Image: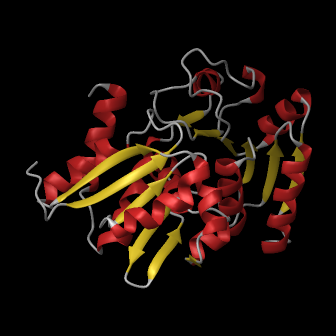
Amino acid sequence: MNLSGHTKPFAVLGHPIGHTLSPVMHNVSMQELGFDGIYLALDVHPDRLMEVLPSMAQMGFVGVNLTVPHKEIAFQGLEKLDESARLLGAANTVEFTEDGMVGHNTDGYGFLKALEEAFGKTVEGDSVFVLGCGGAGRATALMAATKGAKSLVLADIDAERVQKLNDEIMGLTPHVEIVHAFEKSKQIELCRACDLVVQASPVGMKEGDPSLLPPEAFRTGQRTFDLIYMYPETAFLTTAREAGAEIANGLGMLLHQGARAFEIWTGTSPSVSAMRNALEAAVYGK
């Protein structure tokens, strides 16, 4: 990598940020393409995000990704939002243009691409169980509802959060059946009945975190997707696999949301194969 005054900077912002693998995949892709750029990871306190973003634009950054807890803050703070961000109520990608900053959301795109890649289908006609209805769970539930899911189970311990998401979904897709699950016994029963299970809580990001659901919540013929990507298999996925379900971690979602972001920023397709290889090497040691 030859850095110069012409090198185009990109970054991912979060708080904390140490877990991110975005620089790994983007820098390898840019090297593969011969693209004169560099992708950084920067820890920015949420209270300062809307000060930092305009400063980055002035410094010549081409674009940034946002991770926890910045996606909803950017959605509220940015004047210009792409349809993808408006749909999901969050912005994970910021494009710096001559006319100002534009917020996009590539998480929904990445989610659907990852499902199709891992299981051969997305969500159409499925009953979908979403465990954790915060930022990531909210985005996946909204995407599932708008892309043809038959029904949704919203599982969380926060009733207010679930009701708010319920109302958002009903405003967009009133035909989708929605059930709430707060108690563990009900979550187990409803999870087992669903076609697709999405683990969207932060439990599993630390090594040693237990599975939030026991083996009886899963079954053969079920598909289980954990948005966590830094380990090959979380305890949640291990439990599901041992009960007969097909499983996939969040690496594919990270890959495809990042690839879409690069296209938005540059108008150029990244090297998805180089990105994938770099991510798999980091997570699986391949």
Residue 283 drawn above or below residue 117: above
In the displayed orientation, state which residue is furthest to the bottom: 99
Coloration mode = secondary structure
Image side of residue 4 versus residue 262, left or right? left
User: Which residue is rendered at x = 10% and y = 48% of the image?
Assistant: 1
Q: Which residue is nearer to you in this view: 245 or 53?
A: 53
Q: How many marks?
A: 0
Q: Residue 231: give x, y in percent of width and height.
A: 46, 27
Say which residue appears at 90% left-offset and 27% top-offset: 185
Q: Residue furthest top?
A: 208
Residue 147 seen anywhere in this rendered image of the structure:
no
Horizontal side of 134 relative to 184 (left or right) equals left
* In the image, residue 97 above or below residue 85: below
Residue at image point 47% right, 74% down:
101
The picture places residue 209, in percent across and down from the top left corner, at 63, 19
Q: Position of residue 238 (x, y in %)?
A: 58, 22
Give the residue drawn at x 72%, y 47%.
134
- Extreme-left residue of the structure: 2
What quarter of the picture does the C terminus occupy? Answer: top left
Q: Is residue 141 left or right of residue 228?
A: right
In the picture, residue 54 is in which quadrant? bottom left
Q: Is residue 141 visible?
A: yes
Q: Position of residue 146 (x, y in %)?
A: 69, 68
